[in-house]
Amino acid sequence: MKQNSMLAMILAGGRGSRLHDLTNKVAKPAVSYGGKYKIIDFPLSNCANSGIDVVGVLTQYESVLLNSYVAGGGSWGLDARDSGVFVLPPREKADANLDVYRGTADAISQNIDFVDNYDPEYMLILSGDHIYKMNYAKMLQAHKDNGADATIAVIEVPMKEASRFGIMNTDEETGRIIEFEEKPAEPKSNLASMGIYIFNWKLLRKMLVADMKNEESSHDFGKDIIPALLNDGKKLLAYKFKGYWKDVGTIDSLWEANMDLLDKKNGLDLDDRTWTIYTEDVPTLPQFISKEASIKRAFITQGCIVEGEVQNSVLFTGAKVGPGAKVIDSVLMPGAVVEEGAVVTRALVADQVKIGSQAVVGSADSEHIELVAKNVKG
Amino acid sequence: MARALGIISFSENHIWVEGLETYRSIPAFSFLGRYRVVDFPISNMSNSGIDRIQVYIRRKPCSLVEHIGTGRHYNINSKSGYLQMVFADSQEDKDYYNTDIKAYAENLDRMVKASNTHVVIAPGYMVYTQDFDDLLKQHDESGADVTLLYHKVDNAKEAFLSCDFLNLNKQKGVESIERNNGTTKNRNIFMDTYVMRKEIFLDLVQAAQKASSMYTMKHIINDMCGELDIRGVAHKGFFAPIDNLKSYYDANLSLLDQKNVKSLFSEEWPIYTRTSDSCPTQYYETADVKSSFVSNGCRIEGTVENSVIGRGCVIKPGAVVKNCVVLADTVIGNDVHIEGQVVDRLAKVTRMKEIIAEPEKPGYVKRNDMV
């Protein structure tokens, strides 16, 4: 049997409330991105491409869609005999009451029995709401090479934004983490935690068991587990990641991350055939561009029908732009329809939402991107 | 489980699509960018609840085998159902001995064993949608021994010349099956689609073998028109047999007319295919695309007009692609002007700056070719 030396757990329980109506019925990892993807396709595809066979997906908030989406794992090739994607919502147990996951660490604690089935040497903890491509096998190699107890992926952020992140203060030579500060007012470093951790499972298991009993703890990796490891003098390594990484927490940043794809040399490069991002397969026609259509700078996927003008925009699966309609600097989520003559500017039109004929939404000089989550009458 | 066993048949010997067929059999031809021709008959069966399907393959199996794979993408139960590829390799050096009857005879034990009571035979080289469950019901109601599907056309003089037509009497009884010789414009073109009880199918295979070692199912049915109750049912909607380069080209481009799209596709009747996991298509600043179907994974900087573009194609700045069917992963280089072409997979057109043919006689650029 293949050795499952590293098992991955994806934390996918968060609501992402700053995405407002987009996450009314789905958790943030199930939010659509980049024309045909969902955010969780990124960690799942990264796992598949990194040779990780078993992935647990910890769900909590509005998990029905996410559960059915990831179940089976076939979309990412994680359906071989020794592999699988396992959806792990909170459950009732013989020796414990049914309880929600009280924090990121608690979500893992409550599934120690699941992990024990595989008896992995290493545990990879991922967040289900980040967009990036990363080879976790390389990170594991660095973890092993350095004999670390835990390795945390970090990315350099602009110093002025550092106070928005969990910041790692490191020994510059060794990359060893000296201190962790959650959203520091005066950051000492610009190395932000990406919420990607590799732990030696035996050690993490011990920490989690202790953490579960600690009534003071908020059961969070950043707030509790990492500081406790540092306190114990454990060897924590910062693993520097270079490349595209985005936490799409708000409508503006989700829009921006989509707009990034319009650049010819965007850092994400979804066309990279050595690191394919896999997603659910939907039976639709290829995109149809009509005689009257005009398209400049756009990222458009299957099932779309464009009969109007599309400029600087991203069109998701099955989106439609009617004759004479204009879609400028905007994102049309799956199944969104812009009817004849309507004009959409600097807006993000949510799934299945219809913009009626001749209606006008969004404006070119708005400070924020307009989220259109309800049908607009023509 | 459905009562009918599905059979996807191969094309007869007289059919040869120049260029394309050198590399793969017609069912494996790319269609409308993201599909393969065989996706249509298989999806028709799957959507009709037929979950045991045999796909008969005669020549050049690689591409088709790769595409069908486990058959999982066709939405067929993987335990109670199956999608079986049957290789008809009869070791005959003369191709005209390689008949459908011969292929069925070699696999007769499989069919005898199957618990299905009926068979539905549909060709792997024609594009149409049809509810076979509905056809089975019509077959039951009429009490016919064999039901044949046909399509009424008014251009049989210049098209469908590799096809056969049904001679029907007033009660839709089939009196004979004949090759379309292009003498009459109105014909009931036979869609090579049959419904019958399994026992009749087995009898016919036996009878055909007795009659002639070159006999096809069509031949024996034609012989039986007097003895058996054979009836025709008219097909409605889009119908395109792929039997030469022109019909392949025309079938693709005719779907740029939304009216035809609506008569082939509907939301309740999904056409399944294998995903290639390519990303959406990039349209850059200089792109100018009109009246075209474009598949995912393309990067477009040039002009595309009235064309069907396959997955992963690159259209460079200044390139003009007009009235073309461009297969997957091709590159149309800077300032290249191509018109009226079928461009096969992986071709790179960069040096020849002008390749132009009239849509009446489309050209063909070879697979993998550097032009």
Image (cartoon, rainbow, N blue to C red):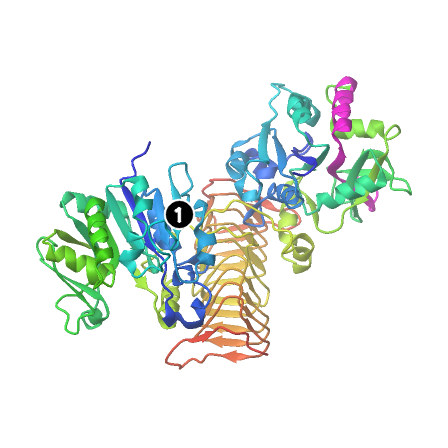
Q: Is residue B173 magenta?
A: no
Give percent across and percent down for residue A269: 35, 55
Q: Is residue B210 magenta?
A: yes
> Considering the image in quadrants, where does the C terminus of chain A appear?
bottom right
Q: Is residue A332 above or below residue A56?
A: below
Give percent across and percent down for residue A266: 33, 60
Q: Which residues are magenta?
A: B182-211
Q: In this rendering, does residue A270 appear at all?
A: no
* Secondary structure found at label 1: strand
Using residue A259 as the reference point, say whether residue A335 is left or right of it.
right
- The amino acid type found where label 1 is placed reads Phe
Nearest the eye: A323 or A353 = A353
> Considering the image in quadrants, where does the N terminus of chain A appear?
top left
Nearest the eye: B335 or A61 = A61
Q: Is residue B69 above or below residue B250?
A: above
Give percent across and percent down for residue A61: 40, 62
At x 59%, y 64%, the residue is: A291
Using residue A316 as the reference point, say whether residue B202 is left or right of it.
right
- Chain letter for mark 1: A
Give percent across and percent down for residue A208: 23, 53
Instruction: Pick out the residue farthest to the front.
Output: A95
At x 14%, y 66%, the residue is: A189
At x 27%, y 57%, the residue is: A105
Using residue B6 as the reference point, say whether residue B19 is left or right of it.
left
Instruction: Pick out the residue farthest to the right.
Output: B170
Mark 1 highlights which residue?
Answer: A86
Image-quadrant location for residue B221: top right
Q: Residues within 10 Å of mark 1 (few under 14, many from 20)?
A: some
Q: Is residue B340 above or below residue A186?
A: above
Q: In this rendering, does residue A254 appear at all?
A: yes
Nearest the eye: B161 or A192 = A192
